[in-house]
Image (spheres, grey):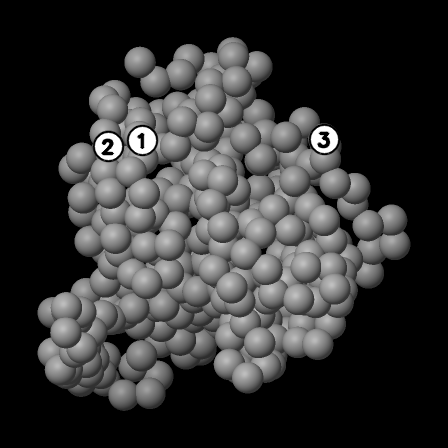
């Protein structure tokens, strides 16, 4: 481990989050992996499930989505302590056709349930061209992109989405009814890296807000509204009855479209599967009560896998995807910038972090050390 002071300027949005000098603690990926796996084992997860859960969780840290990586490990532990996570779930299909399935996650870690469900979608696609799986009775599943990317090695397009606890006010609403409800789509290419779009249907994911709160920084206008529906820079406003805003921020900038996207995710993930939807989705944090009048079981996900050769020869498609990617990447750009392909920044960060280590904020490290002591797990030397 070593101390690292950095000043990061990544994009217009991330610059607001990170354009201050920070002292971070750096940990080798393999050490972080071993520690995280031992925590899941201490929770009672079988070896294979602990391995999968760790791989999925740390994929977020590797790709630079720090809000959804090991920083959330303590949250999973607290949910397990509260009896809201089943460490040894019987994940099973409860309804299916040749191309579709509904999966019951049995209250398991979403980090474990989701890869099983995505694999079912892939297996169905191998047989009939496409596979579609809706999941109920699960928990938070990490980053959406990991699951969508599982399809890439099979020359398939992968789709992943999940609903989440209600922190988002639909356009014109004062009440929080939707989650940040991300969507991920992974598309293979031939010689170029795949295109991987992974995004929340809000102006900013709640995890970015949590990072601002840890740093005691303001949020950009358009991220949050207060309890009266007025946009505010106060990153702590959710604690006072405020809400995150759909993608677009306000109607003039298309928030009704972000509201539509979040609604689609909620319906595909939960109304379709029998999970809780809208304001009934259980919160990720253990200290908030689960709704007493549930309309379903747990959190819901939705996955899709489509064989490229169900539409045209895979090699032809991937050759044209290379052409698509290079055309966009080489487009004339505004001064000082370049045109990115979805997935480019995350891929570059992953290469760096595998070689140089994963940076963690000191408050995150403090939480991890407390969990390690509580569960009798050795922390990283």
Discs 2, 3 touching: Cβ within 8 Å: no
Residue shown at the point (13%, 82%) measured from the top left: 332
Residue denoted by label 2: 5
Q: Is residue 258 left or right of residue 285?
A: left
Q: Are marks 1 and 2 in contact (CB under 8 Å)?
A: yes
User: Of the residues under marks 2 and 3, which one precedes in the sequence?
Assistant: 2
Q: Residues within 10 Å of mark 1 (few under 14, many from 20)?
A: some
Residue corresponding to mark 1: 24
Q: Position of residue 334 (x, y in %)?
A: 18, 77
Q: Earlier in the sequence, mark 1 or mark 3?
A: 1
SS at mark 2 in the image: strand
**Tag 2 or tag 1, which sits nearer the N-term?**
2
Q: Is residue 181 at all visible to an observer of this figure? A: no
Q: Residue at x 57, y 70 (%)?
A: 246
Q: Position of residue 295 (x, y in %)?
A: 82, 60
- Between 229 and 34, the one nearer to me in the picture: 229
Q: Quadrant of the N terminus?
A: top left
Q: Nearer the viewer, mark 1 or mark 3?
A: 1
Residue 23 appears in the picture as rendered: yes
Q: Quadrant of the C terminus?
A: top left
Does residue 352 lie above or below 370 as drawn? Answer: below
- Of residue 287 and residue 264, the one placed in the foreground of this image is 287
Q: Separation of disc 2 and disc 3 at Cα?
A: 37 Å
Tell me the tag on residue 82.
3
Which one is in front, 27 or 230? 230
Residue 325 drawn above or below residue 206: below
Mark whose residue sits in front, 2 or 3: 2
Q: Is residue 325 left or right of residue 220?
A: left
Find numbered disc 3 in the image and state the secondary structure of the residue it sits on.
Answer: loop
Q: Please provide percent x and percent y for residue 311.
A: 33, 87
């Amino acid at each position: 481990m070593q101390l690292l002071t950095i000043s990061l300027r990544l994009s217009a949005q991330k610059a607001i989050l990170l354009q201050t000098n920070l002292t971070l603690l750096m940990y080798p990926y393999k050490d972080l992996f071993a520690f995280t796996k031992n925590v899941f084992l201490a929770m009672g997860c079988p070896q294979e499930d602990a391995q999968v859960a760790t791989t999925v969780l740390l994929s977020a840290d590797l790709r630079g989505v720090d809000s959804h990586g090991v920083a959330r490990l303590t949250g999973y532990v607290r949910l397990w302590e509260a009896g809201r996570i089943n460490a040894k779930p019987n994940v099973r299909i409860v309804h299916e056709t040749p191309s579709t399935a509904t999966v019951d996650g049995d209250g398991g870690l979403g980090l474990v349930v989701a890869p099983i469900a995505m694999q079912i979608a892939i297996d169905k696609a191998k047989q009939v061209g496409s596979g579609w799986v809706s999941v109920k009775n699960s928990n938070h599943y990490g980053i959406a992109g990991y699951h969508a990317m599982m399809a890439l090695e099979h020359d398939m397009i992968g789709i992943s989405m999940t609903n989440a606890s209600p922190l988002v006010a639909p356009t014109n609403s004062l009440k929080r009814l939707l989650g940040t409800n991300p969507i991920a789509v992974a598309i293979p290419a031939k010689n170029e890296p795949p295109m991987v779009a992974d995004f929340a249907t809000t102006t900013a994911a709640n995890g970015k807000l949590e990072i601002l709160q840890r740093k005691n920084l303001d949020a950009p206008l358009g991220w949050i509204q207060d309890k009266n529906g007025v946009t505010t820079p106060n990153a702590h406003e959710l604690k006072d009855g405020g809400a995150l805003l759909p993608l677009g921020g306000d109607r003039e900038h298309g928030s009704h479209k972000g509201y539509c996207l979040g609604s689609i995710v909620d319906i595909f993930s939960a109304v379709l599967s029998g999970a809780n939807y809208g304001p009934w989705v259980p919160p990720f944090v253990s200290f908030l009560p689960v709704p007493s009048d549930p309309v379903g079981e747990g959190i819901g996900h939705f996955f899709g896998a489509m064989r490229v050769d169900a539409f045209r020869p895979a090699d032809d498609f991937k050759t044209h995807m290379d052409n698509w990617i290079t055309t966009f990447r080489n487009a004339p750009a505004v001064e000082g910038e370049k045109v990115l392909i979805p997935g480019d920044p995350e891929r570059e960060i992953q290469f760096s972090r595998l070689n140089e280590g994963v940076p963690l904020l000191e408050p995150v490290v403090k939480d991890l050390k407390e969990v390690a002591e509580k569960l009798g797990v050795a922390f990283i030397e």
